[in-house]
Image (spheres, rainbow, N blue to C red):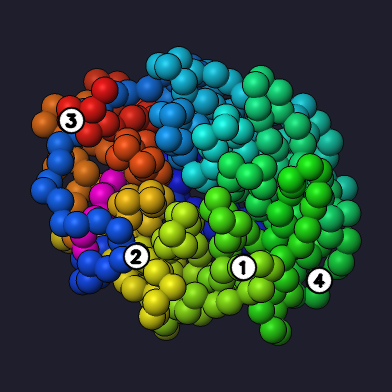
Amino acid sequence: MRHLRHWPALLAAPLLGVPLIFAATATASAAEHVARRPPMSYRVTVLPSLGGTASAGNSINNRGWVAGTSNLPGDTVTRAALWRDGEIIDLGTLGGPNSAVLWPVTTDNGTVVGVAETPSANPLGEAFSCAAFFPTVTNHVCRGFAWRSGVMRALPTLGGPDSFATGANDRGQIVGWAENTVRDPTCQSPQVLQFRAVIWGPRGRISQLGPLPNDSVTAATAINNRGQVVGISGSCGTAVGGVSARHAVIWTHGQVRSLGTLGGSQWNTPMAINDHGVVVGFANLPGPDPAVPDFRAFIWTGHGPMRDLGVLPGDAVSEALGINDRGQVVGESCRAGFTGCSAFLWQDGVMTNLNQLVPHPVGHLVFAGDINYAGQITGQAIDQRTGAAVAFLAAPAGSR
């Protein structure tokens, strides 16, 4: 399996189906909430694994807790993992083999959300979104989970077998998507059932977020502390197809609004939203075959259209994966075919290869999955000593 965040063909289906991609001249504005800053250097720490050769940091909160994935020995099973105080915690599963934390989802109050397999086989033979992130397709039922203080609990569905959790805030709200009982005619095998974006909580509630006119499915990918939710709206397709993400959208007080596109008709996917309402993600460029991923990282500030953040020199595709409340954006930039990827940091309108900001590298930083308010970054690197794909924590030089 390629490194955990490469979901080109994964994502848009229920995102996404979604287990990953700037030099735009974004003018400094109130939305970026920063004055121009000098280049910063980072010290990088390789985080421990659960014994396999692939790990990834996909989320970091303001307490410095990192969450993501780590393979068990043999690399046939992956687990949701939490790195806290330099130690790794296996968050377990819901009874099946695999689990994962895949989005920037770790709240400051200690809740971690993700997806985990149950011991049950999917009664309809669906692979659902989770299959894109695990080493093998097991066709087990997959459910979104919330983990806190050592306890993992499954999140309910809308009547179908599967759900998927992607985001959480400090108000006790969790977002993602869940299957209902509608056999949507726009679904393509092996997907059978329709899925809708949901908000779980607070206090056990579950509510749906509706699609744009003429769409049938939705999926939520992130939520901020103001309760704004971003995600996708489209038709069912497959659980890992492109038409689910025809439209990148934001829900405010339950009302849906399109974020626009960069010209492509599929794969338009928000990944994160900060507390100022600034959204980042990736969108497809126009091309002869809309099903072929040709991603560019984007930023949307709520004022004007979605903006293309470009790519690093020599690259062809990019994805923005995380943003903090200071307007700093992280992600990855790659050559054609999602090869030769490098983590980037974008701030003040400039995209920089994060590897160039590390005076004492421990390996090549492949992607940056999330950044917290202090500027700490997590993601995945190739360890120069072992060649393994490892989770990393990059801290600004001079920070504690």
The residue pinned by badge 1 equals 251
Q: Secondary structure at mark 3?
A: loop
Query: Label 3 vs label 4: CA separation?
Result: 52 Å
Query: Label 2 vs label 3: CA separation?
Result: 26 Å
Q: Amino acid at mark 4?
A: Asp
Residue located 43% across and 25% down the image: 53
The reply to whether residue 56 is in sight is: no
The image's mark for residue 31 is: 2
Whether residue 46 is in magenta: the answer is no
The image's mark for residue 184 is: 4
- Magenta segment boundaries in residue numbering: 343-349
Q: Amino acid at mark 2?
A: Ala
Q: Amino acid at mark 1?
A: Trp
Mark 2 nearby-residue class (10 Å; few <14, some 14–19, many ≥20):
some
Q: Position of residue 97 (x, y in %)?
A: 69, 28
Residue located 40% across and 69% down the image: 300
Residue 303 appears in which quarter of the rendering? bottom left
Q: Secondary structure at mark 2?
A: loop
The residue pinned by badge 3 equals 397
Of the numbered discs 4 and 2, the one sitting upstream in the chain is 2
Q: Secondary structure at mark 1?
A: strand
Mark 1 nearby-residue class (10 Å; few <14, some 14–19, many ≥20):
some
Mark 4 nearby-residue class (10 Å; few <14, some 14–19, many ≥20):
some
Q: Is residue 361 left or right of residue 79?
A: left
